[in-house]
Image (spheres, rainbow, N blue to C red):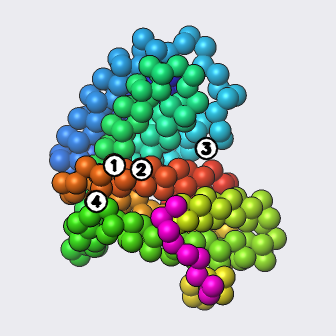
Amino acid sequence: MALAEAQERRAAARYDQLAARMDRFGSPETATLFRQLATMEREHVEALSDWASPAAPRGALPDDLGEGTAADSDDTPASLTPYRALAIAVRNEERAFSLLTYVAAHAGNTEVRVRAEALALEELRHVALLRTQRRMAFHAKRHDGGGSERDIAVAMRSIVDLRVLAGRLISGALETHKGVTRELRGAGDQDAANLVFRLIAGEEAEAQGLGVRNSAGSEAETSAGGGVTTPSTLFARAMRPVEDMVDIFLAAAERSQDEEVVRETQRLAGIAITWLAELRAVPGASD
């Protein structure tokens, strides 16, 4: 809880900084969003302060829940665009969600677990809000309409529809990740290949829970085109289907009126965010 409090305190200060940058950039709507987020994070600091121990057990955390990367350090370029600012915020909120779910999973105290789960759900809502705004900023920059993730989400009318879609998305991610694993092994990067292979194991377990059978032909799929293949491009390829899952599941949670669908989409989005964190923990991985 002390780690979560410190993370929320840094996030609030960071959002104040990003708001000022967006004012200078000429994007008042984005600046207002960051100020609202700063207020929310300070509310989280208050909620956590009574629970946090003075000494944080830093060594007890997985590597991917540590202090973060250069993307959220204080050396952000002065020419920061709304899209990049929102991308930084998405990373902050995803890491906060991962940390709070980690706390909830390992809490020996029921009250701590319940409080951490409630705060994690709030962070998940922040992720959904920021991802929507980031997608809008991206499409505004590209001058196209976008919205395909939301269109897919609207088509889900029941838990059966959701499970069919989730199975299809996870099967697609599995196909991509098996190909990436082979390419990493071929390039001699065994550590990175092992990480993606562990991710595949989690995806296969989730697919099995959804009643999805592994495709016999999925192992045959490899690269998506020519050009120079580097660990960075391979991890960008590996992240893409997981990013899509997060966006689709969060959009479905936002639009659905069915409580069972909302709970399941939030659960699936949380799992996908955890998978993203695992991929980003590898040196050289990119967004």
Rounded to the nearest angstrom, the CA distance separating label 3 from label 2 is: 20 Å
Number of residues whose C-alpha sits closer than 10 Å to that of mark 3, classed few (under 14), some (14–19) or many (20 or more): some
Circles 2 and 1: CB atoms closer than 8 Å: yes
**Which residue is identified by label 3?**
64
Q: Which mark is residue 252?
A: 4
Q: Position of residue 261 (x, y in %)?
A: 30, 56
Q: Secondary structure at mark 4?
A: helix
Q: How many marks?
A: 4
Rounded to the nearest angstrom, the CA distance separating label 2 from label 1 is: 6 Å
At a point 60% along the width and 19% down the height, the residue shown is 56
Rounded to the nearest angstrom, the CA distance separating label 4 from label 2 is: 12 Å
Q: Position of residue 88 (x, y in %)?
A: 42, 48
Q: Position of residue 22 (x, y in %)?
A: 27, 45
**Which residue is identified by label 2?**
267
The quadrant holding residue 111 is top left
In-image side of 146 versus 96 (left or right): left
Magenta span dominant secondary structure: loop
Number of residues whose C-alpha sits closer than 10 Å to that of mark 1, classed few (under 14), some (14–19) or many (20 or more): few
**Of the residues under marks 1 and 3, which one precedes in the sequence?**
3
Which portion, as a residue range, is magenta? 209-217
Does the stretch in magenta take in 181?
no
Type of the residue with mark 2: Arg
Rounded to the nearest angstrom, the CA distance separating label 4 from label 3 is: 27 Å
Does residue 181 lie above or below 74 as drawn?
below
